[in-house]
Image: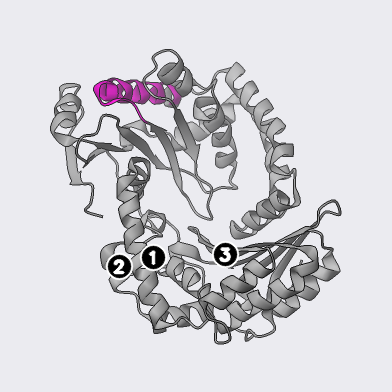
Amino acid sequence: MDGPKGSRVIVEPAGDTPLVWITVTALGGAAADPPGKEGMMRHMAELARRGTRERDRNAIEDAVDRLGASLDVGAQRDSVSFSATVLGRHVDELITLLADILAGAAMREQEHEKLLRETRNSLDDVRDDDSLLATRYFDRSCVPGHPYGRTARGTETSLTALDVEEIRDAFRAQCAPQNLIIGFGGDIDSDRGLALAERLVAGLPAAPAPPLPDIEPPPAPKKRRIYVVDKPERTQTQITLGHLGPRYGTDDAVALTAVETAFGGTFTSRLMQEIRVRRGWSYGASCRLYRARGPHWFRISLAPAAEVTADALELTLSLYEDLAAEGLREDELAFAKSYLEGSIPFVLATPRQRLSVAVSNQIFGLPGDYIHIEAEKLAKLDLDQTHAALSRWAAPDRACIVLVATADSMVPRLEARGFGPIEVVPYDAY
């Protein structure tokens, strides 16, 4: 519903809980990071949480702890958010704190430098985690130049370019009420939610929302590319492969949601049965269509032992080629539709979950009840529609393939199977 100063307010009431969930979401997200300053939106949100003109970082932490509450920040591709949980009897005090952060974030130089050091240390954690490393390199390489391909966390180089004054300006722009989605769930009703939203934006100028970032991707590469992210002494290989997929909310995305489920979304899916159950090559094998405001990835992931990596990659590509050529079977589509229909009540079981779904729909530019619209489309989905969507989007011959492995031993194995050309990149180069 329409909120104060042009904001949008969502309320998901539930009288059977003493808790209130609060979210304040600004549209834009990591896709709005200026070129060469990747990580800026994430840094901005984290820095705002660390002090206002009235409270330093310790005072904020003390206030949250005293209320027995939680207050977290997050930066996604299309949004940045503050999320809180608090007992209903303490919601007024938490709203006062959140309003102070939105209107009076101090962005102190000392905290800025401290946060930069912490983020650089977290980059070491990414390099230590092979799954995160594969994702990081895949995002960068899948469609070069795509806004979703730039890291939300930043790089050593981009973090150095961040300037506190520019971050302050960005935060003021992002917090324009017209750019905010304010959500409440739990022990609260609509009138109370609107009153609290009024307090949240009271100290914000009624400025227009900043333009949303352009998320139309550049043309995708037209040939298969293989990257080995070279990391010493790997006995297991993280494999990520895929390509661009349709924007969430389109009919093709609905069709590929069924494909995602049948091909790699459950234990009985093709990938899991062939890779794990029949051969024991990887504990998991899955595919995922990413949900976002713009076209995002259709991605397959598995983690076989190094000695069977070439076999597993060859079989995975063969299975995907068969899917692209022949589509789903009737029984697979029926299972996927039944599974997805049955999962809806679990997705909407709590006010917190309903709030999350409603806010996500707003971020993606979809109707608030889109989950039910999608369910109706899935119920009517047939094999012809899934085959048509696969013909437009499935591209095993143009997939980006990233393997985190030890190059000296892995590259010869891959080349012996006819994979190539292969580009080797150091694991700590990004």
Q: Position of residue 323 (x, y in %)?
A: 45, 24
Q: Would you say 97 lies left or right of 136 here?
A: right
Task: Give neighbour class at mark 3: few <14, some 14-19, many 20+ (Cα, 10 Å).
Answer: many
Label drawn at residue 52? none
- Would you name the residue on which mark 3 appears? 81
Label drawn at residue 158? 2
Residue depicted at 52% across the width and 49% down the height: 247
Task: Give the CA separation, mark 3 to mark 1.
Answer: 15 Å
Which residue ends up furthest to the top in the rendered image?
278
* Residue type, mark 2 in image: Ser
Q: Position of residue 122 (x, y in %)?
A: 36, 57
Q: Position of residue 47 (x, y in %)?
A: 47, 73
Task: Give neighbour class at mark 2: few <14, some 14-19, many 20+ (Cα, 10 Å).
Answer: some
Q: Would you say 245 lies left or right of 23 here?
A: left
Which quadrant would residue 84 be assigned to in this image?
Answer: bottom right
Q: Would you say 106 lies left or right of 372 here?
A: left
Q: Which residues are magenta?
A: 303-323
Residue depicted at 68% across the width and 26% down the height: 338
Label 1: state its secondary structure.
loop
* Residue type, mark 1 in image: Gly
